[in-house]
Image (cartoon, coloured by chain):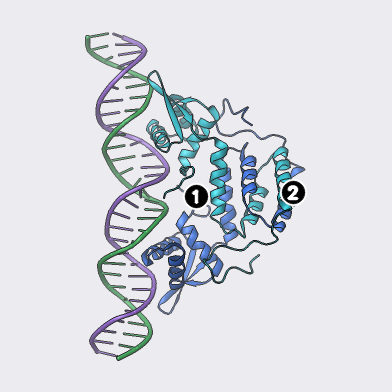
Chain colours: A blue, B cyan, C purple, D green
Amino acid sequence: MESGKVSAISGSEWEVMRVIWTLKNVTSHQLVEIMQQKRQWSVSTVKTLLSRLVAKKMLATRKDGRQFVYQPLVTEMFAMSQTSLALFQDMCAMKVGKALLADIKELTLSKNDIDDLMQMLQAKRKTAPSEIACNCLPREHCCEGEQ
Amino acid sequence: MESGKVSAISGSEWEVMRVIWTLKNVTSHQLVEIMQQKRQWSVSTVKTLLSRLVAKKMLATRKDGRQFVYQPLVTEMFAMSQTSLALFQDMCAMKVGKALLADIKELTLSKNDIDDLMQMLQAKRKTAPSEIACNCLPREHCCEGEQ
DNA sequence: CCTGATCGTCGACAACTGTAAACACAAAAA
DNA sequence: TTTTTGTGTTTACAGTTGTCGACGATCAGG
C-alpha cells in the first residue's frame, strides 16, 4: 500500500489525531489522560500510536522539558476531505452520487453547511453530465440496469 | 476490530466486490481473468481474496460443475453508504459538512444525482440546527475557532 | 547524591492485508 | 487409462494495526 497522499492513518490513529487537531498543542501526558478517559487505552497504547503518527509524518514533536508536545502536520480538513474523497474514488463512479445521498440523509448538517452544499451543487449542475458510466470493469460489459 | 455492520472489507477485497456486484454472477475463472487484466494479480491472489470474502459473508458460492459461481450477499449500494457513512461518523461532527463540500467539489456527479441531492438538502434544511458541536473530546474544552 | 516518579523507545504478539506458491482432487484430453 | 489442466484449499510471509509490558534515561525530592 503505497500512496502519495495522507499516509492513510488507521482508525485508532485517527482518534488520536482528532484530539490533537482540536487542542492544537498537546503534551503526551494530556493525550494519555484524554485517551484513557475516552477509550480506556493503556499508557503504552497511546504512546505507540503517537510514535506511529510521528513516523507517518502526521505529527511533529517539540521537546518541552522532559516531555514532548505534539502538533499536527496536516490540517484536519485536509485529512478529512482527502480520506473521504479517496474512499469515494474507489467506488463505482456511477453510484457515488447515490451513496452521497444516503450519507447526507443520515448525517446531521448545519444550516450553513447545507447552504454551502446547495450552492456548490447549483454551480456544478451547469456543467454536470446527464449520465456517468460505471467504471467497475476494465472494458467489456458494464452495469446497465440496477439504477 | 469487531463490528455488526458490513465486516469492513479491505481495499483489494473491495475491488473484487465491485466486479461481482456489476456482473452479479461470476465464475472464479471470469474473476481471475478480469482481475488479471485490471490489476495484474496472480490467480492465487484472486482466489485468496474470494475465499476471504466468502469467509466474511460478503459472497455466497454456488457450485456449478467443477467451479464456483460467486454471488454478492450485500448490495453495492448498502456497502457503499455503510462504509462512507461509517467514515464520516468517525470524523469531527462539526466539520463533516465541510468535508462533504470538498468531496462534492471534486467528484463528478450527474445532473440527476445533483437534483436528488439538492432536494434532500432542501428537505433537511427545515430541521437543520444552526450549529453542530465538535465531538472530538470527551468533555472539557472543545474546538471553538478554526471555522 | 540517591531515590522514585516520569518519559520516550523497544520489543511483543495476535489479527488483518496484500500477494502468491504448493498441494490435492476432479475433469478433460490423449 | 494415463496425463494434463483447471479448481478450490492450505500454507506462507512480509507489513500494518490494535494493544501492551519492559527497559533505560531523566527530572524532581529528600
Question: In the rendered image, which residue does mark 2 sit on?
Answer: B122
Count how many numbered circles sit on residues in the image. 2
Disc 2: host chain: B
> Is residue B87 placed above or below B94 in the rendered structure?
above
Give the class, few, some or many, for how many residues have Cα within 10 Å of label 2's Cα (few <14, many ≥20).
Answer: some
Q: Nearer the viewer, mark 1 or mark 2?
A: 2
In the rendered image, residue A121, in percent from the top left (x then y), is placed at 73, 47
In the rendered image, residue B1, in percent from the top left (x then y), is placed at 41, 50
Give the class, few, some or many, for how many residues have Cα within 10 Å of label 1's Cα (few <14, many ≥20).
Answer: few
- Compared across the picture, whether A127 is left or right of B50 comes to right
Q: CA distance from mark 1 to mark 2?
A: 37 Å
* Residue type, mark 1 in image: Ser
Q: Nearer the viewer, residue A10 or B108?
A: A10
> Is residue A59 placed above or below B81 in the rendered structure?
below
Residue B123 marker: none
The image quadrant of residue C3 is bottom left
The kind of secondary structure element at disc 1 is: loop
In the rendered image, residue A26, in percent from the top left (x then y), is placed at 49, 71
Question: In the rendered image, which residue does mark 1 sit on?
Answer: A3
The answer, for residue A72, to whether it is visible in the render is: no
